[in-house]
Amino acid sequence: MKVEKGIMVALGYGKYFKSDSIVGLEPIEEGRGPGKRTLVHVEDMDEPIVASRSEGAILRDLIEMPKEITKTREQYQLLSDILDTIAEINPVLRSIIRDQGKWDIDRLEERIKELLEEEEETEGNAS
């Protein structure tokens, strides 16, 4: 079990906190209901935040990487693999593919490089 640093965790009703700032979850026992399910203790805050999500749902978000991030990383890796394969295509074959297949591998290679650079910049800014 590992908390992913810097991931925003939804507490419900538009409340979000960084995963690494949440230090405790406490189910609300008395008066529990819609909008009042869990007390979330956040570092540097004297009072806990009342969350509308259950402690189990919040805990899952804290210790599991969100599907969007996992999917993005898989797509990034796939593009990297495609780029490596494209780089190995020799100039003669590239010319044939461009002329016969009407597929500009040079342009595809450039576009993939741009996308990967954009993702690296985004990752760098998120850290």
Image (cartoon, rainbow, N blue to C red):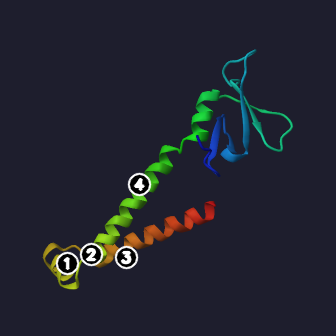
Question: To which residue does mark 3 refer?
Answer: 110
Q: Are marks 1 and 4 in contact (CB under 8 Å)?
A: no
As shown in the figure, which amino acid type bears the numbered disc 3?
Glu
Image quarter of the C terminus: bottom right
Q: CA distance from mark 1 to mark 4?
A: 28 Å
Instruction: Name the side, left or right, on which 21 lies relative to 64.
Output: right
Residue type at the position of mark 4: Glu
Q: Which residue is mark 1?
A: 98
Q: SS class of the residue under badge 4? A: helix
Mark 4 vs mark 2: in front? 4
Q: Secondary structure at mark 2?
A: helix
In the image, taking residue 27 as reference, residue 112 lies left or right, namely left
Of residues 50 and 87, the one drawn nearer to the viewer in this rendering? 87
Q: Nearer the viewer, residue 20 or 11?
A: 20
Q: Residue furthest bottom?
A: 92
Dot 3 or dot 1: first in sequence order is 1
Report the mark closest to the observer, 3 or 4: 4
Q: Nearer the viewer, residue 91 or 97?
A: 91
| C-alpha gap between disc 3 and disc 4 | 20 Å
Q: Is residue 76 above or below residue 51?
A: below
Give the answer, above or below, for where 31 lies relative to 40: above
Q: How much space separates mark 1 and mark 2, taking CA atoms?
A: 7 Å
- Secondary structure beneath label 3: helix
Image coords of residue 8 (percent x, y): 63, 46
Q: Which residue is mark 4?
A: 74
Q: Residues within 10 Å of mark 1 (few under 14, many from 20)?
A: some
Q: Earlier in the sequence, mark 1 or mark 2?
A: 1
Query: Mark 3 to mark 1: distance in Å?
Result: 15 Å
Closest to the camera, between mark 1 and mark 4, is: 4
Query: Mark 1 or 4 closer to N-term?
Result: 4
Residue at image mark 2: 105
Task: Report the residue at 22% width, 82% height from top.
Answer: 90
